[in-house]
Amino acid sequence: MNEAVIEIVEPQDKDTDAEPIVVARAVYEHPFIVRLCHWINTVALFVMVGSGLQIFRAFPSFGAKIPQKDLLHWPKAFAIGGWLGGALQWHLTFMWIYIGTGTLYFGYQLFSGNYRQVLFTHRDIPGVWPMVKHYFFFGPKPPLREAYNPLQKQAYTSAIGLGVLSVLTGLAVWKPVQFSWLAWMMGGFHYARIWHFAVMWAILFFVLGHLVMVILHGWNNFVSMLTGWKKDPEY
Amino acid sequence: MKNQSAKNNDRRISDRRMEEKKFRGVTRRELLKLTPVVALGAFAIPGLQERLLKKGLGFSDWASAWLFRQDHFAPTFDDADVAPFAKFPINGYDVDDPGVDFDSWTLTVSGAVQKPGEYKLAQVQALPRIRQNTRHICVEGWDVIGRFGGARLSDFLNMVGADTTARFITVNCADDYYESLDMATALHPQSLLCYEMYDQSLSREHGAPLRLQIPTKVGYKQAKYLTELKVTNVLEKVGYWEDQGYSWFYGL
């Protein structure tokens, strides 16, 4: 991580031998592929959730068709596609974009080794409790040595896992015959549809927490997902 | 960052230090690299949106056809898992009973077949009878396990001398519904010309006297009240719901 830290210095004559004055530090935190996938996936996830909720509106229940007991009536204003057929077009188009960016992200993280930045492992466990104390019980801020603290790693690792689950449960709903083994693992088509819905809410829960933290961490942190460079990192 | 080591290295690794102006240039270039994301905005342009979504749906259909395996069976269920007949939903696009006259009913077979003509229900029923408990899945999201009986569509196609290298089967219905199938699905062993549900003759609401029952397809592909069947290489009509914007292949 340290290799990527640079110092931003005041303009200086070429001939001078004096130490330049450092005005800020910056670190290259998010490689291009990660940023690209992040933003394409932001759009794709938005469309998948919006169209998915419109699809759900066609049969807003997880029980039998007869008698039909509706679970919740999702407002049309917060859905994409206008009707079931339109929503399916959006869903079946953007799922390829969603899967595409997911695959690209996975491949990149794996082969570049950059996964170490986000992957929560057993080594992060000791740091969990101090971070929880800091976030929720006004405890002192534990010293940071890398881009993400253990709780962040846990959140991002979970989110990536949920992304994979959203695709797997979706495949079981879309192709319960060709992927009958997948649907079977989820309890059959009927339950795969419930899992798919549940995974969506789990992802939305992550997104909510993510947005809150982004707002709390301020501008420099947000900009780093656009330019890759984070000014004045906390470590 | 350790200040000590930075001091030792700064002369040699000059790119570890840069002026604000240069840093701004670097970050601007990094930001510009993200412009491909803006291409997604094409989906917000009204005329383009329709075409792109059609392409997306078409690609999904292509993938569906590619994923389809003729030797892979849809799950079948024990009699105990079958929903009561009264709880099997009746779903039509128009009327539940188009008033078919059973006595004069025939299935008109045409297209790439050696023996075109009018076929009586008894001729379909003379073919080996298949009985299967399978899951019926509606595009809306509900599903129900039912019991179906009928003749294999492949057996019927064999009887009429159909050219099974043709690409499509199209059907017309007494309620003016119309549908089309890929040949691979039509030849699947679980694809039935169905005349029975729950060991009883098909009721009018469920598509009497003859309907398609295809456990590898979503519900709207399984047309009811069949009157015409054609084997063809050219799709003149695709399907009622497909014309409204639904997927054509929609294989499960």
Image (spheres, coloured by chain):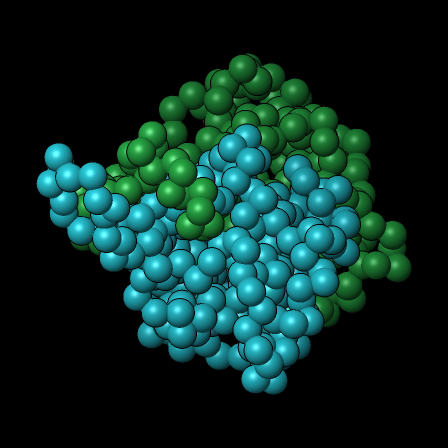
Q: Residue at x 34, y 45 (%)?
A: A6
Q: Residue at x 38, y 24 (%)?
A: B234
Question: Residue A167: x percent and y percent?
Answer: 57, 48
What shade does chain A have? cyan
Foreground residue among B190 and A184:
A184
Foreground residue among A186 and A226:
A226
- B122 shown above or below A123: above
- B109 shown above or below A139: above
Q: Which chain is green?
A: B
Q: Residue at x 39, y 36 (%)?
A: B9
Q: Is residue A225 visible?
A: yes
Question: Residue A230: x percent and y percent?
Answer: 35, 54
- B67 shown above or below A88: above
Q: Residue at x 28, y 42 (%)?
A: B17
Q: Is residue B107 visible?
A: no
Foreground residue among B80 and A170:
A170
Question: Residue A99: x percent and y percent?
Answer: 49, 42
Question: Residue B169: x percent and y percent?
Answer: 50, 30
In the picture, the quarter occupied by the C terminus of chain B is top right
Q: Quadrant of residue A101?
A: top left
Q: Tell whether B155 sits left or right of A83.
A: right
Disc tally is 0
